[in-house]
Structure formats: C-alpha cells, structure tokens
Image: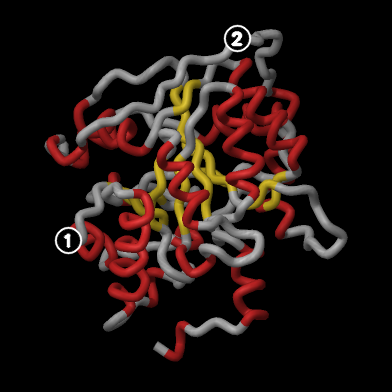
C-alpha cells in the first residue's frame, strides 16, 4: 500500500499532467491542416438532448469483426478547462483548454450539427447497430478537475449536450477537484460518471492487489456516490495491455477507452479510440482533427 501514498508534490505533478500519452496528437501538425477545415456557422438553434438511459446489461456483445466494421464515432478527451498560467509548460498546454477556446469549440460543434451521445449509447450502437442521431459525438472529461463542473457542464448544457466524466477518486474533495456532491449532481443531470482508477496508476504495471486498490474500491466509491453501476473505464494515459481486458470484463465493465492508438482487433470494445482536444486548437483545427481521426 505504501507505494500508492502520494506526496503532495507528486500528486500535484500527476494531476497537472492528466492523461498524457505517447500517442497524443501533435498540435503543430494539426494546425498545419487548419485551412482545410471549415466550421459551419450561423446556427443558433439548440440541438436536441440526445443522451438517454439504456439498459446495456441486456445487449448481446457482437463479434469483433462486426464492431470493427461500424463507422467510428468521434470521441473527444478533455482534461483541464482553465486559462493558461505562466507556470504551464508548452507540453501541458495541450491538456489545458482555455475557457474561451473551450466555449468556441463547443459552439463550433453545435453550429456544425453535432449531437452528443453517452457511453451507453455508443455501446448499443457498436453491438447492435442501433441508430444514432446525426453527426454523433462523445465528449469525455478525465481526472475530476472542478472546472469540468463549473465551466464545462454549464457550457454543454447551453447546447443541450451531455458528457462522460471519468473520475479519479483520490482527488475527490481536494482543492481544485470535484466534491462528492458535484459528481452526484453531474450524474443526476443526465451525464455519465465512470471509472478512472484511484490515483491514475498505469494499468500496464498492475500486480497483486493493484486491481483491488485501483479498480474495485474506486468503482464502488463512485457507485455509492451516484447510485449507479459503473460499466465504462478510461485507461490512465490511454495505456493498456491485453492482460487488463479480462480483468475489466470480470469486474462487469462493458467497454474501455484508450487514446489515439489503433483499436485491438480481438477486443475493440475495450480499446475505443479518443483524441485529446488540445488547448492550442482553434475550432477549425478541432473540426479538421475530428474528420481526419475518425
């Protein structure tokens, strides 16, 4: 257990780095193709609320070939939504989206006709081919930062959007992170709260009691807070290995999310791709990245 006790300094470094992965998108290369993307503008109508409750326990899992044949749904990954500070490194700014930039990105999605869906709907689509709204997209938020509650959620609500919040439980109630009440409120408002380990420990390094400490206990904590079962998981840093998948399955998880690397051909539901929405990206760049990545 000693190895999991984070010093205040180490914890701060961990939380500020978020889910950084070696597979992250290069913001410079994305910006180079910025001119090829054009966001549709001028639409002020609010998209219909597309998140809905689905009992995914009754959905039969399709074979991998069928799932891989379905068109991928864009999935965006956000971390901190706040203005940059002088102490923020160039690399960390990829994971810190300034408030005005985030709002402009959400407006672009709404003006372009995107409709948010939740992880349960994505699962239903991948298994059953269940119809989705036009231009579906999944908005995910990692690591429990309070700005996801104070900034992101109200912005999403403005456009009738819902998000999937992958919560790291070690940070609950700490300064700059969400409280239990805020997490419950997100869930009560129709967003999905899902599992993201206890302290962001790399899944590829799990041995012995790690599965209990990092997955079992945090998942139970979130189920107690929300009153809902956890079925979806996001790998810290987007890193996974084949050994992790049966461990997740036997704990009742239905899907798991990586970052920009290739899906596993045997277990595509446990390697669902996401791209990190960079703090450097204009709405045009984000639009172009969505089209090129999915």
In the rendered view, would you say 165 is above or below 236? above
Residue 225 placement (x, y as % from top left): 38, 55
Q: Which numbered circle lies on residue 186?
A: none
Say whether residue 246 is left or right of residue 147. left
Residue sitting farthest toward the right: 86
Label 2 close to label 1 by CB (< 8 Å): no
**Residue at position x 20%, y 55% in the image:** 252
Residue 61 placement (x, y as % from top left): 15, 40
Of labels 2 and 1, earlier in sequence is: 2
Name the secondary structure under disc 2. Answer: loop
Which residue was labeled with disc 2? Answer: 45
Residue in the foreground of this view, choosing between 151 and 188: 188
Gap between marks 2 and 1 measured at Cα: 44 Å
Residue in the foreground of this view, choosing between 145 and 60: 145
Quadrant for residue 129, please give it: top left
Which residue was labeled with disc 1? Answer: 250
Residue in the foreground of this view, choosing between 13 and 216: 216
Quadrant for residue 117, please give it: top left
Name the secondary structure under disc 1. Answer: helix
**Mark 2 surroundings: few (<14), some (14-19) or many (≥20) residues within 10 A:** few
In the rendered view, would you say 212 is above or below 98? below
**Residue at position x 51%, y 27% in the image:** 161
**Residue at position x 47%, y 27% in the image:** 116
Residue 205 placement (x, y as % from top left): 39, 77
Say whether residue 251 is left or right of residue 238. left
What is the total number of numbered labels drawn onto the structure image? Answer: 2
Asked whether the viewer can see residue 272, the reply is yes
Asked whether the viewer can see residue 264, the reply is no
């Amino acid at each position: 257990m000693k190895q999991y006790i984070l010093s205040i300094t180490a914890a701060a470094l961990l939380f500020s780095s978020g889910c950084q992965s070696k597979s992250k998108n290069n913001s410079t290369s994305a910006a180079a193709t910025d001119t090829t993307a054009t966001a549709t503008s001028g639409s002020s109508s609010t998209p219909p609320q597309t998140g809905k409750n689905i009992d995914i326990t009754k959905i039969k899992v399709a074979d991998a070939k069928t799932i891989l044949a379905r068109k991928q749904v864009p999935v965006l990954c956000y971390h901190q939504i706040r203005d940059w500070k002088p102490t923020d490194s160039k690399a960390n700014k990829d994971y810190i989206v300034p408030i005005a930039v985030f709002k402009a990105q959400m407006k672009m999605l709404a003006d372009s006709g995107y409709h948010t869906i939740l992880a349960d709907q994505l699962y239903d689509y991948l298994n059953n081919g269940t119809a989705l709204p036009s231009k579906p997209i999944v908005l995910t938020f990692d690591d429990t930062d309070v700005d996801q509650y104070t900034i992101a959620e109200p912005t999403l609500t403005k456009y009738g959007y819902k998000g999937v919040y992958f919560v790291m439980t070690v940070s609950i109630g700490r300064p700059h992170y969400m409280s239990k009440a805020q997490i419950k409120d997100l869930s009560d408002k129709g967003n999905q709260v899902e599992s993201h380990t206890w302290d962001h420990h790399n899944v590829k390094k799990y041995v012995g009691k790690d599965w209990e400490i990092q997955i079992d206990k945090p998942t139970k904590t979130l189920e107690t807070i929300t009153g809902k079962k956890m079925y979806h998981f996001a790998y810290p840093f987007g890193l996974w290995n084949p050994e992790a998948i049966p461990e997740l399955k036997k704990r009742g998880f239905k899907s798991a999310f990586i970052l920009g690397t290739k899906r596993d051909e045997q277990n595509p539901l446990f390697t669902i791709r996401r791209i990190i929405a960079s703090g450097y990206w204009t709405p045009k760049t984000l639009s172009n990245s969505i089209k090129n990545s999915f």
